[in-house]
Image (cartoon, rainbow, N blue to C red):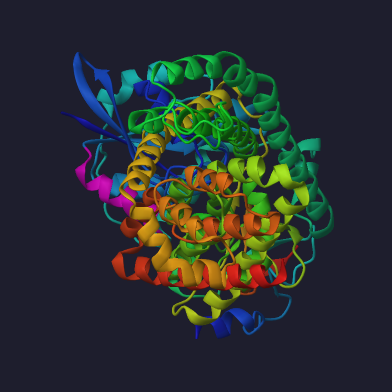
Amino acid sequence: MTKILLMGNPNVGKSAIFSRLTGVKAIVSNYPGTTISYTRGYMKLGGETAEVIDAPGTYTLEPTSEAEEIALRLLDSGDIVINVVNAINLERNLYLTLQLLERGIPVVVALNLWDDTKHRGVDIDLDKLRELLGVPVIPTVAITGQGIKELAENIPRATSPHQPPATRDERWANIGQIIEQVQRIHHRHHTWRERLEDASVSPFSGGIIALAILAASFFVIRFIGEGLINYVLDPLFNTLWAPVVLKLSQLMGGSGLLHDIIIGKLIGGEIDFVQSFGLLTSGLYVPLGVVLPYIVSFYLVLGILEDTGYLPRLAVLMDTILHRLGLHGYAIIPNLLGLGCNVPAILSTRILESKRERFIAATLISIAVPCAALQAMIFGLVGARGLGYVAIVYGTLFIVWIILGLILNRTVKGFSPELLIEIPPYRLPPWRMVLQKLWFRTYGFLAEAIPIILGAILVVNVLYILGVFDAIANFTAPVVTGLLGLPKEAVTALVIGFLRKDVALGMLAPLALTSGQLVVGSVVLAMLFPCIATFVVMFRELGVVNMLKAVGVMIVAALVTGGILNLIL
Amino acid sequence: MYRFMHRSGGRFKPGDNQLTLAQLKNGQSGTVVEIQGGRRMVDRLNALGIIPGKKITKTSAMLMRGPVTVEVDRAEVAIGFGMASRVVVKPG
């Protein structure tokens, strides 16, 4: 089968073209480094099926990060390359084009963001460019689909003009000559958009804009999340689902082994969706009634931030602070993704250049960045005791994030390179794409989380029945009770945290904890042992030795922080 | 070694009528004269269009040796302070 590779600089629209060609939905954002692995899809090519691969963005074929190395490895297995080029910045995009032509692989060029050329004052002589490069050049607008049909028709005409291998300086000289012949630039005045772009990366106005955006994001996430819970999901569960489950409970006799697993314990003769802990009660309520609303609201806001192009600007503002933590500004993106789910966040550390940065970022995320599922439960359980307690949990995690970063920066060997990123222009988010991405991520949560949540609740009930938890509780009582000041039964939550953090926090609900104990429990649960999915991804991305180091740091940090909180609260 | 170089951002001295990107004022333009760094750094900067002979404009700089933002070929690029201190430009 013919293998078609989509290659090009970061943030030129490869994933958008990929989605158009194959119908496979890939995540598209307005910042360099959205695609950190590759996505595969299929398209019809002259009656036959061809495989299309969406590669991570790369500036050259001499890789400087893990994501770029992946792109280079993919190139060895490809038959045809669709080189996606940003029409606004033709000059530096052509460097990769020339490198591809030197490799002798057939190339067709997609000149994307073509609609921008007019209002940005860029004139490109397409025929001349085709002649000079010796390959088909098709103008495209991936977001609207313009030019995609022509691009598909021209894939079989991809050719290799067999450019001789050149040095760096020869390539740049060659590009200079090409640009001279094909590109004309018209001067234009600054637009309001450019003024806003400049203001976003100035120290003073940029700081104000960042605070305003982060505060607005927080309120919108909370407003939508709480709105969905109070006006949609709670009424659904309480008025429709509760009577059904209660009826079922009566049919099953109100108690017994099977009853406890499926329905759980009745609290005062009623169903309590948090405390009952059966498959049909908490098993459905935790993922759908508590976590889902916050997944939807968080990823909606994140998607808008991603697609406007704000995140790289936040990276510039945060650079000085993140340098103290052994990272550079761009590491803010994996950390923000971690507030949704730690798994894609740790994968996205591939956009960082050095092993040291990746280790520090992954360790910080897994310890001090709580995922949306856990945060939803924190808001639900701890929030019921007063928002001040929620603030203590977040404040503690933030302080841990800073202190741990300062320590790791002083102790981890190796070097962290400096920030060097392209900042994309601001764009109005394409709403169809924002909603598509939201659906993509929400579906991912439902498909992956619900089976594990149900499994975790089953395991909890079986272990209770077998008395395993009592044994563990007695064994770990000195640490849990002595150091953390929690009842010894709380250890069951810490154990289950390995499966799902949201379920684990739910297990603290029936323990009648004081508010202080609930804060300690939430913080320790957030820090100690990431869920199994995060473990697996850390193992794959960091290797076994570094994963074990991260776990060591994690255990010490969680116990020290929990112990200190216990003394203060 | 690297960290030392990073902290002493102004270690490389540009010639007469020349400034580093870090020294250029906000809003000031200049032509890139040379990049005083290793091959890897030159490659990374080249890839973003920062090549000798190229005209660039500094748009802003963060406080406390934060990154420098420049405009080059209709694109905005943020460059860490240490790296910006090794890009020599001729103002004007």
Residue A67 is covered by the magenta coloring = yes
Can I make out residue A425 in this image?
A: yes
The image quadrant that residue A150 belongs to is top left
The residue positioned 44% from the left and 80% from the top of the image is A413
Question: How many numbered discs, if any?
Answer: 0
Residue at 53% of width from left, 35% of height from top? A87
Q: Is residue A277 above or below residue B78?
A: above
Q: Percent position (x, y) of residue A457?
A: 40, 39
Tell me if A276 is positioned left or right of B13 in this view. Answer: left
Residue under the point 22% across and 25% down: A50
Between residues A105 and A270, which one lies in front from this camera angle? Answer: A270
**Does residue A227 appear left or right of residue A286 in this picture?**
right
Q: Farthest residue toward the left?
A: A1
Q: Which residues are magenta?
A: A64-78
For residue A250, above or below residue A501: above
Front-most of residues A465 and B47: A465
Q: Quadrant of residue A369?
A: bottom right
In-front residue for pair A267/A375: A267
Q: Position of residue A355 (x, y in %)?
A: 41, 67
Magenta segment: does it hold A535? no
Quarter placement of the N terminus of chain A: top left
Residue A180 position in % (x across, y down): 53, 44
Q: Position of residue A334 (x, y in %)?
A: 53, 52
Quadrant where the image shows the C terminus of chain A: bottom right
What predominant SS class does the magenta segment belong to?
A: helix
